[in-house]
Image (cartoon, grey):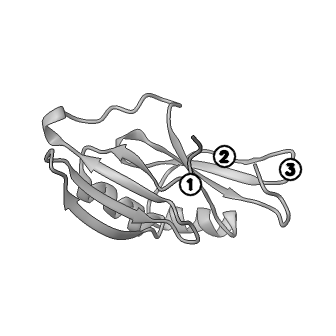
Amino acid sequence: MRVKKLLHTRMRVSDMDETIRFYTDVLGLEVMERKVSPRGSHLAFLKVPNSEELIELCSFPASGPVKVQEDLVHLAFEVEHLDTTITALNAKGVKITDGPTRTSSGSRFIFIDAPDGYEIELIERPPGVALV
């Protein structure tokens, strides 16, 4: 067996509305669908620009608050201009938790925190560089 492609990644969240506001207002993602699963989980599917894969947010309050361990999970997004991104984040009151850092390939990146402690990496890559 061989999988065909990645469709979505699920992340459990404590507060669906707060998390959706972060991903839409800060990162510019788009909510494609919201629904309740047969098990009672509240779900939201977010579209990332220029990507087919979705981020699925899942809230199930009966299981208690989400506690993400440090350095366990992060999402990485490419940005066009890191300096412009930093200025926009500062204007929204979003704290940069690490960076900016430059890699040996010339990419630059920073980290910010999403609700529940999920880390978000924002990467500016020079032309022709495929990975960080």
Q: Which residue is mark 3?
A: 105
Q: Secondary structure at mark 3?
A: loop
Q: Which residue is mark 1?
A: 5
**Label annotation for residue 132:** none
Above or below: residue 3 compared with residue 7 = above
In the image shown, does 98 or 39 lie closer to the viewer? 39
Label 1 or label 2, whichever comes before in sequence order: 1
Q: Residue at x 48, y 65 (%)?
A: 27
Mark 3, other Cα within 10 Å: few <14 / some 14–19 / many ≥20? few
Q: Residue at x 35, y 69 (%)?
A: 31
Q: Which quadrant does the N terminus fall into?
A: top right
Above or below: residue 130 compared with residue 63 = below
Q: CA distance from mark 2 to mark 3?
A: 16 Å
Closer to viewer: mark 1 or mark 3? 1
Q: Secondary structure at mark 2?
A: strand
Q: Amino acid at mark 1?
A: Lys
Q: CA distance from mark 1 to mark 3?
A: 27 Å
Closer to viewer: mark 1 or mark 2? 1
Q: Which residue is mark 2?
A: 99
Q: Residue at x 35, y 41 (%)?
A: 116
Residue, far top: 69
Label 2 or label 3, whichever comes before in sequence order: 2
